[in-house]
Amino acid sequence: MSGLPPYSTYRTDPKQMQYPQQLSHGNILTFTPPGFKQTLNVKFPDCRLAVCERCKKNYKTRDMCRVRNSHTSEPWTTAYIAFTLDDNCTDDDGKYVDKPFAVRMIQWQPYCVKAPFDSKTPVCSACKKTNRTRSFCRERHKHRQLPWCTVYVLLSPADTIDPSTKVAPEGIPIESSSSVKTEVKDEEKTENVDLVVPEEEKSTKETDEKDAQIPKVSRGDGDDINDIAESRTFLAKVSCKESSIHWLEMADFDM
Ligand SMILES: [Zn+2]
Ligand SMILES: [Zn+2]
């Protein structure tokens, strides 16, 4: 995986939906997956990222929102992103490590969700090719393959990748802004003479403040980032209303 080419080299047949292209400027989605302590920047293939909530209300096109105005907030409708953790995203004990991450696109992979999708989920790639409906794919046949529009990406600590393959800014820790504020408050306290805050109380207070930093997008009933599955890959469902993550498994080939 270390020899991953930059995005612009993924020039394949534009009719093949599994291998989308990303040549345009913009098309970056900025969001914090549940359980992450950083906001990720995900570069989307051209014309794949739906408009933001505000642009939806104002009837703006994807090109206006995502390319010309470089809006990066969550889309009004759900985006599906399959994230694979590379070897450097876990420590020697196999535990997830939250460091500033870089996100780069990889090719389609035959992953499945563990529990069937709901009936509103877009059809899988096979059903898209044969023009099947959502009810055929998700209800009648309970296909657990990912929606055809899923974007497949590799998550790597930003300091471990070749900078020339970077396509979007690296993740930004969400504590950074609040810790600055906390420092200022601590200074004020020392000036207020003998107001000694017990260590325990102080730390719970800081945790509360950090929790308050977590964006207003609600967490769906998804999985925990720390319960890493064998596939090392999870599906993130992201919209302005809800975001959740779901660990995946490799598909059975006898479908
Ligand atoms: Zn917008
Ligand atoms: Zn299907």
Image (cartoon, grey):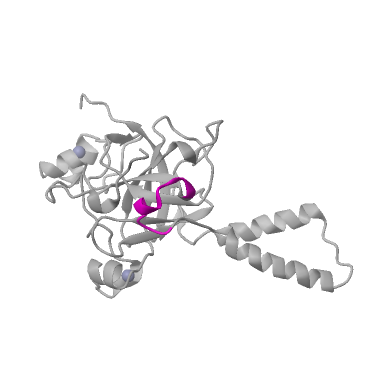
Q: Quadrant of ligand 1?
A: bottom left
Q: Residue at x 23, y 39 (%)?
A: 139
- The quarter holding residue 146 reads top left
> Which residue, as the protein is rendered here, is positioned at the far top?
254
Q: Position of residue 57 (x, y in %)?
A: 30, 73
Q: Measured along the vertical axis of the image, is residue 225 above or below residue 211?
A: above
Q: Is residue 219 left or right of residue 73?
A: right
Q: Residue at x 71, y 58 (%)?
A: 205
Q: Is residue 81 left or right of residue 213?
A: left
Q: Is residue 166 magenta?
A: yes
> Which residue, as the protein is rendered here, is positioned at the far bottom?
58
- Residue nearest the viewer, comparing 23 with 186: 23
- The quarter holding residue 203 reads bottom right
Q: Quadrant of the C terminus?
A: top left
Q: Residue at x 54, y 59 (%)?
A: 174
| Region of the chain picked out in magenta, as a range | 159-169
- Residue nearest the viewer, comparing 146 with 7: 7
Q: Position of residue 125 (x, y in %)?
A: 19, 41
Q: Measured along the vertical axis of the image, is residue 2 above or below residue 62?
A: above
Q: Position of residue 82 (x, y in %)?
A: 34, 44
Q: Residue at x 16, y 47 (%)?
A: 12
- Residue nearest the viewer, comparing 96 with 162: 162
- The quarter holding residue 197 reads bottom right
Q: Quadrant of the N terminus?
A: top left
Q: Is residue 175 magenta?
A: no
Visible residue check, residue 221: no
Q: Position of residue 180 (x, y in %)?
A: 64, 66
Q: Measured along the vertical axis of the image, is residue 56 above or below residue 166?
A: below
Visible residue check, residue 8: yes
